[in-house]
Structures are given as C-alpha cells and as structure tokens.
Amino acid sequence: MMIHRTGPLFTDLYELTMAAGYFRHRITGRATFSLFIRDYHRQRSFYLMAGLGEVLRELADFRFNPGELDYLRQTGLFATDFIAYLSDMRFSGDVYALPEGTVFFANEPIMEIDAPIDQAQLLETYLLNTIGFQTLIATKAARCVHAAGGRPVIDFSLRRTQGHDAGLKVARSSYLAGFEATSNVLAGKLYGIPVSGTMAHSFVTAFEREIDAFRAYADAFPEKCVLLIDTYDTLEGARNAVRVARYLRDRGASLVGVRLDSGDMVSLSVAVRRILDDAGFPGVKIFASSGLDEFSIARLRGEGACIDAFGVGTRMGVSADAPYLDIVYKMVRFNGRNVRKLSPGKATLAGAKQVFRRYDEQGKCREDIIGLRDEKVSGADPLMVPVMRAGKPLGPEMPLVDIRRQATENMQQLDSRYKRPEADSSYPVTISPGLLEIQK
Amino acid sequence: MMIHRTGPLFTDLYELTMAAGYFRHRITGRATFSLFIRDYHRQRSFYLMAGLGEVLRELADFRFNPGELDYLRQTGLFATDFIAYLSDMRFSGDVYALPEGTVFFANEPIMEIDAPIDQAQLLETYLLNTIGFQTLIATKAARCVHAAGGRPVIDFSLRRTQGHDAGLKVARSSYLAGFEATSNVLAGKLYGIPVSGTMAHSFVTAFEREIDAFRAYADAFPEKCVLLIDTYDTLEGARNAVRVARYLRDRGASLVGVRLDSGDMVSLSVAVRRILDDAGFPGVKIFASSGLDEFSIARLRGEGACIDAFGVGTRMGVSADAPYLDIVYKMVRFNGRNVRKLSPGKATLAGAKQVFRRYDEQGKCREDIIGLRDEKVSGADPLMVPVMRAGKPLGPEMPLVDIRRQATENMQQLDSRYKRPEADSSYPVTISPGLLEIQK
C-alpha cells in the first residue's frame, strides 16, 4: 500500500553523496531552496498547487530508521561517522508554501525551504516528485472541470495511472480541482471522496441478452442504476434502457442514467436523448466516457452533444498531453549569500522570494509580482505562507473539502482566457525592483 | 511507502457493484479474462512484459480485511450478505502469463485469468494498472538501451515520476530492460539494483569556487567521483575537472568521469573529450543527462557526440511520448461459452488463448501466431505459461537478475528494425485457424 511513510531513501543517491561531502567538509550553513516550474508545457497558462499536506506530514516525521541506515552502510559509499550523523538527523527547517488549491504561474516560487544545507538538499527528489505530480494532475483536472462548464466530471483513471500511488493521488488531486467523484474505491476510503461507477461490458456479456444484464443490475442497485448501452448496438441499448426505466418506475424507483463508451458521441448522444425523451424519461441522464479530456469535452459541448456528465480517465490521470512538469528545486541563498546558476537555458533567480498578487475591482487576478520574501508590494497580497517552523507544522492539515473550495475560488478569480483548452494568453508576471536588484 | 499489500479496494467501484449484481443473481460460473494491448501507440513495434511478480504476490494474498469491509458497508451500496461473502473471498483461479522480460506484440494475450466470474472481474483495475504501467516503462527503457548501443544507461527519473510507486517501478522496470543502475536509493534497497549518482548544481554553488566544490567531492568519494561541469561554463568546468583528475592521481585514485547537463551536447562533448585527452586523461568518462530518451540518444550518437554513458530521466520515467498503453482486460469465455463485445473500434476475439512464436535459423523471432489455448501450432513455441493454479503460485518468484537476462535475450532475438526509435516495421502476428473458427 502507499499511504505509509515514504522515508528518506526515496531520493536520488547524489543527494546523499552531496550531504556526505558537506559533512566531511563541515559545511553546515543555512540554505534557502526554491521550488518552481520553469516553463509552461504546451497549452497550459496556469497551475493549481497540490500535494502540500502529504509533504508536511513527511517532513515532520523525517528520520532514517535502522534498516535504512543498514542499507546505506552496505553500499560501502558512506563513512561510519556520517551514518551516525544521519541516524540523528531530523528536519529542523522553516517552510513557506502556497496553500493547496492556489492558482499560480510559471517561474513563481511555490515552496521555499530554509534549513541547514544538507537537510534542504536531501529533500529535493522527494519534493519535486510529490508536489510536481499532484500539481500536474490538479492542473489538468481543473482544465477538464472548466471545459465541462458546470456539468459533473468524474475520475475514471485508476486502471491506467502510472502506478498505485499515482492512482490515489489522481483521485485526490482531481477532486481537489473540482471533480465530483472518483471510481477509485481506496481513494474513497482514504480521503472521503464520493465514489461512483456503473458497469463494464463484461457484465453485459455475462448474460444471454443485454436486457437481462440491465434488469439484473437494476435489481441490485435500483436507486443508483446507470446502464452501459454500447456493448452491442447503442440505440438498441437505449431502447433496452427505456424498458428498465419503466421496470424501475413500476417499482417506485427511477433509472439514473445511461453511459456511452464508444462511437460518435455527438450523434449517438442526440439520438439516445431523443429515445429517452420520447419514451417519457427526460430525467434519465447521459454519461459519456472513453478517451475524454478537456479538449474532447470542449469539442463535444461545442458540437451539441447531449451529455450530462463526463467520466474522465487515462488522459487526465497521466496528463497525457503534458505528462510531466519542468519543476525544479534550486538553491537561491546560502550562508547569507544569494546564489544562482548560469547554465544555458537553466539560469535561476537568486534570493529568498515571495509571490504577490494584484486583483481588479471584480476580484479577478490582474497580475503577479515575484519579489523578495521581506519586500512589501503595494496593493498586492503575498501568496506564500509559513507552514513549518523549525521542523514543526504551524497548524493542522487543511481538510480536503476546504482545499477544494479554495481551488474553486481561485479558479473563479482567473479570467477564462487562461482556462481554455488551447491556452493562448499569458498571465502577466513581473519581477519586483528589489528582486531584480540582487541579481546583479 | 508503497511496498506493502495494495488490497482489493484498489479497484473501480463498478467492479464491486458488478460483483454484487452477480452475487444477487447467483451468477457464479467460471470466466476467462484476457489481458492485452489493443494498439501500438506511436513509434512502438514491440512491448516488454513486466510486473508479473508483484501481481502473483497480491493474488496469493487476496482478501478483504475488516477495515475495508467496514468502508464498503458505510457506502450504503452493498447488502450485508454480500459483505459477508466478500469477507470469505480468496482468489481461487488459474493464471497463465508471459514471463516478465518477454517481448510481445499488440493484440497478443499477455495474461489470462480463469476464475469464478466475480473474482476475475474484481481484478480488472488492479491488473491493468500494475502490468500496464510496468510494461509501458520496460518497453520505453528497452528502446533507450537499444539506442545507446551498448553504452551504459542509468535511471535518473525519480524526481519526476508520477508518484512514489511509479518511482520504484520505473527503477525496477528499466533495470529489467537492461539499464545499468538507478539513482533511486530506495529501489536499490528494495530490489538490489546498483545505485549511482554524481552531484547537483547546488553542490557547486555552495562553494565559493567550482574547483573547491570539485575537490571537496573528490575528497569524500575519491573512488567514485563524477563531476558536474556545466554550472558556470562547461569548458572551464572541464579544465577544473582535469585539475581534480591530477589531484586524485597524486593520491593514487582516478577520476571516474564528468557530467554534462545542458547546452549543445555534441560540440561540448567533443570539446570536453579533447580537453581530457590532451591533459592525459583518456580514461575519464563523459556522462550526459538532461532531457534524454531513445530519440535524443540516437541523435547524439548519430552526430558524433563523445558520450560514454547516458543518464535518462523524466522522458523515460513517464514514457513521455506515449504515457499510457491501450491495455484492456476482456472476458473472452464464460460458462463454457466463448464471448466477445462488438463495440465499434473495440471488438475483441473470443476464446481462451495462447501465443505461439516461430524463430528463424539464426534464432531470431520470425512470426507470432495467436491461437487457442489448447491448440498445437507446428514449429512454434507457446509463450504463456501457467503461473498460478487454484490461487496458488506454481513456483517461486523469478529473481530480477534472471528476468533481466531473459529480457536481454528476448531483445537480441528481435530484429533491430523493430527496435529503432522510429519504429516503421510491423512484426507479423497472425490468428490461427482454430481461433478464427470460433469467432463465427
């Protein structure tokens, strides 16, 4: 299972060899590392922060256990005194971060760690992985929610996420971003997310006739019955669904919906809607699934498909058009000195930072300013907040429903031109004079 | 952490509602489900099987624990007698599968489950996720290994894999496919994979001068020193590396290598090679990283880059050009009756199957035949083997090194036209007369 402690060996070896190098040379100064996304990857013009809660739990519990230390000893790479030093290591740093559910933009710091350099360095791989992936999916999911224009969107991705932990994180991140429910039962249990599901084609083929399968399912779930109607012939399936709708009505229940999973969804949904309406069942909803994402949802809506809810799977669950973020974690300050690297195409801004946001009169985001952490930017709100001091969390973990509300509000504050599937506008982000000054 | 039991709630809700439907209607017949990949996703013309060991451990331990049953009860979806039935459920089926490390092709069954229909159905989501992702990565990694033409390839992907479980599975799947090592320390501990790593830019910027950082690292790791030389200026970095090479030589050690992580790798690697050679260090290796995959490795080699080893990260770790497989799990036989679905573009072949392979005189794969499980195909070897009978594994788990050897042999048997980055040839796979006959 994937909900236990991840532990400090979830790291690249070089984080440990560097720490050993610092230890040997008694380099113990305090460093500031900044986590940010370098560039938009295709059609993205915003990001939605996710993954912080898990990170703070892990940092509060940071320690090498005996088995982990044994393994490091066995590699033959590390001196005995360094292993002893690791065995006493706890995370003692300060952490600043955007709250989960905050909309942000490329190059903005989203988390900063102030800590002894070895501790801060050891976290790199874990932070990039944990915040990066959840932010990737929350962003993709928020785009799907926007494309659906208020119609419910449900996470169906579990079968093709990249591993088990990803399956859980996709359910959480997509719910955070405004999804209505997930098919992922374990995520339902762990996070309290509503669970949802219908039937597979195999259920239909397990019976001699489609109508027998539909009746059997309706008998088992009279109040929650959604029928998959495309196993043999979608229109015939819709007519069988009408029979079941009558069957349920005779028993005091009502058919919730039908699901389309193949074929031309525009023409099929219109035809199925007509069959249902003509039979006197305008309340039976049409669910669609199969290869959906923000692009196809927008297209289906644009072409007049009669779809009431979208089941979104693989393409959201792996962020298929952009399956990773160019997220990096860079040292920007060390021993009271601002630092940066100059590698071509990978230059970074020195200094401990803050992100400031200005809003217009309607409360919409107008512009962001990346400034120094201790700077004041007039008429703008700082977005990063202190979340950990000397290794201790500054307050309880934010409940998922509150994060979800915050995400919804943040998305409402963002002009729709940045939320379209084909993002063609770039939100204004500038550098403050103070931050610019220290780059010289 | 992600190495414990995953458990039966790692599933889509509909697997459970369908099982409840079968239970209510006393549908208990034996079904055969077949796992296969429907279509090649861009530039792929083979796949490499991975993930079976984990699946067999999970199936042998399949059971709902009290907390899981409690959660199902709380959803209000399931009757008490069904929950009681689940509490006694163990996996009692037979499993046939391709061994890990087997090369295979689209539409070939790679695993078949014969079990009571509800048990077989409940496994769908878990099997698709677990086999699908590891096969995706093993395939991508095998392509990278082929592109590198015998030069070592190392997994650097952990920071941007899709979650924690993915990070571990990528390390295992890429090692299985022929990678030399991983940067992932936890994977080193869990799977016994060699670990490898150098330093980050932050290590260099933590010192006043680059040469100080290099010397400090060389002092700490005199036998395993690889220097990252592009933090400020790559050629100057190479000259500093020469100083360290001399420093180590004076102390009876030798510099292992330098690493390039940005800029034009072709011209830089040639220039760095010359600096190292001119200074009398032809044995110091040049490692390259940053955005590598099979496409860029092939290009770098084609353009004459002087690179001795490749660090491959994100693009392999998320299979960036094809981040999911069109893998499906379909019921093909139920209660002694062959079944299939007819949905447009998603039709399946009925019947329990086997994959047969013919080889030419040189031992290269010549063609595959998908046939019936109990068919004999002359001059061809069956590839799927029984791995579980009545819920019990038929033998111990294959050690990872043996799987890796098997993968290497399988890749050698595959003609190189199928292994090129831009796969433009389609390996011949035909359907046996026996299998064709039962589709009527």
Image (cartoon, coloured by chain):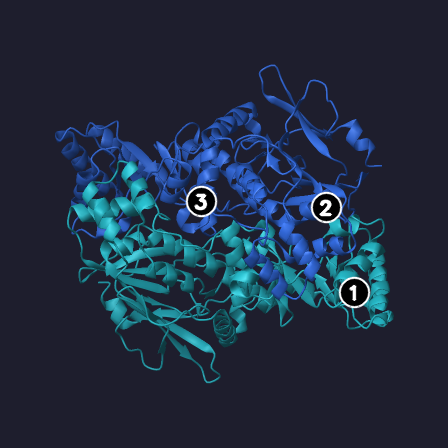
Chain colours: A blue, B cyan
**Image coords of residue A343 (percent x, y):** 77, 49
Towards the viewer: B269 or B76: B76
Look at the image and tell me whether residue B360 can be seen: yes
**Mark 2 and 1 residues: CB-CB less than 8 Å, in contact?**
no
**Mark 2 and 3 residues: CB-CB less than 8 Å, in contact?**
no
**Image coords of residue B52 (percent x, y):** 41, 64
Q: Residue furthest top?
A: A361
Q: Are marks 2 and 3 on the same chain?
A: yes
The residue to which callout 2 is attached is A117
Type of residue at label 2?
A: Ile
Q: Residue at x 79, y 48 (%)?
A: B205
Look at the image and tell me whether residue B305 can be seen: no
- Splitting the image into 4 quarters, where does residue B29 fall? bottom left
Which chain is home to disc 3?
A: A
Badge 3 element: helix
- Splitting the image into 4 quarters, where does residue A265 fall? top left
Badge 1 element: helix
Q: CA distance from mark 1 to mark 3?
A: 46 Å
The residue to which callout 1 is attached is B270
Q: Are marks 1 and 3 on the same chain?
A: no
The residue to which callout 3 is attached is A168
